[in-house]
Image (cartoon, rainbow, N blue to C red):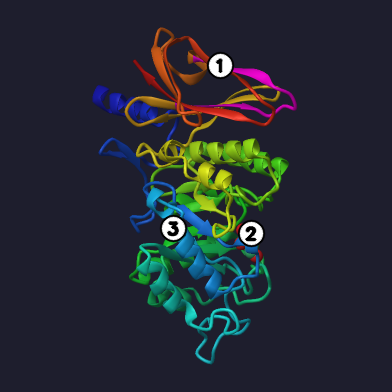
Amino acid sequence: MWMMMLIMLLLLVSNGEEVGGSSGEVEDGIISRNLLANGLALTPPMGWNSWNHFQCSIEEKLIRETADAMVSSGLAALGYQYINLDDCWAELNRDSKGNLVPKSSTFPSGIKALANYVHSKGLKLGIYSDAGTRTCSNTMPGSLGHEEQDAKTFASWGVDYLKYDNCFNTGTNPKERYPIMSQALLNSGRPIYFSLCEWGQEQPATWAPKIGNSWRTTGDISDKWESMISCADENDRWASYAAPGGWNDPDMLEVGNGGMTTEEYRAHFSIWALAKAPLLVGCDIRAMDNVTLALLSNKDVISVNQDKLGVQGKKIKKDGDLEVWSGPLSKNRTTVVLWNKGTSSATVIAYWSDLGLNPTAVVKAHDLWTHSIQRGLKGNISANIESHACKMFVLTPQ
Ligand code: GAL
């Protein structure tokens, strides 16, 4: 009995909070749940998706060049591996056997050839469909009623990832429609990452971990500060449901698309990393500038996102526009983002009590953006921070 209680307590402490209502077990020190049995996404996915920058203007040359740029920019070596097509890759009508058909004007070589190309670069290919009769662009068929056939098609093409949208859905509940595709993907015989995109409407964090590798918690992000911070906040509500195998998805990155300042993009990337969000780049990586590349290439920030403990960091303190976000990392470390959302510079402070650290702890702080180290910190960490900027640290007790 006491042993049971001790194990329960350890589970709570190691996850930093309750285990999101699902049955947890400890394996190699990591909490596992009733996971989707495809073995994928033990850390959040990293890659690129066509939608934020290109919307429907996609064609196979762009996708091949993007795969090339992923490798030549060094991003692939940092873990960005998925090259994901979004909406608009197929013809409006299925063929006479009911199969999806790649759009001949834009994908004349077909998806299998594209997957082969992407795989030859050491990367993975993602595709997009919809749990309805048409996709959101209204230019291609959805997979509702064709789940087994489409999952087999995707597997036969060598697809590694499916984003599954929610338009033209005939009004039935996503909880009925999404599990059918999840099972069809499992039946396809190929491990295919399953990304649910029902925009957070039916609180997917509460039911999607069993059927998907990630689930959108928000409507569509746009390349604006207000949109980005609202996605971060909506996503934060569901922090306790994320764990290895299944992640909350506050939508894809806008870093590099031009609508926010460098400091706003730095905060966007820092918070997505801390929140264990999928890191799916949404800009034209063939033409990104050095500032964008430097933001997306920060190894230390990426390693917070990819930390094996897999606990989503969250907002732990708010004082007007001044916020502290934090979460536990493996090896008894803690990550902290001090964020000034206000319009003028201000000092943001996090006390050890805010962070759940022992009040007497002496801490080493590694600044993940300046790469400087402060030793011997006692009681709190603070910094003067410009408007809309943040600082991100990893704290290690000394
Ligand atoms: C939306 C989805 C976007 C994008 C778009 C394509 O529903 O949230 O991320 O996929 O459809 O039409």
Question: Please, is residue 237 above or below residue 391 in the view?
Answer: below
Farthest residue, direction front: 290
Asked if the stretch drawn in magenta spans residue 22, the answer is: no
Residue bearing the label numbered 2: 53
Name the kind of residue labelled 3 in the image: Ser
Q: Looking at the picture, how far across and down is residue 98, in whole percent?
A: 52, 86
Q: Which mark is residue 72?
A: 3
**Where is ligand 1, by quadrant?**
bottom right
Which residue: 48% across, 9% down?
A: 379
Mark 2–mark 3 distance (CA, rounded to whole Å):
20 Å
Q: Does residue 153 show up?
A: no
The Cα–Cα distance between marks 1 and 3, rounded to whole angstroms, is 38 Å
User: What residue sits 41% from the left and 76% below the top?
Assistant: 157
x and y percentages locating residue 366 in the rendered image: 43, 24
Q: Residue at x 36, y 69 (%)?
A: 120
**On the image, numbered disc 1 is attached to which residue?**
382
Instruction: Report the magenta residues as a range.
Output: 335-351
> What's the amino acid at mark 1?
Ser
Q: Which numbered disc flags the more N-terminal residue, 1 or 3?
A: 3
In terms of sequence position, does the residue under pointer 2 or pointer 3 come before the other?
A: 2
Label located before the other in sequence (1 or 2): 2
Which secondary structure class fits the magenta region best? Answer: strand
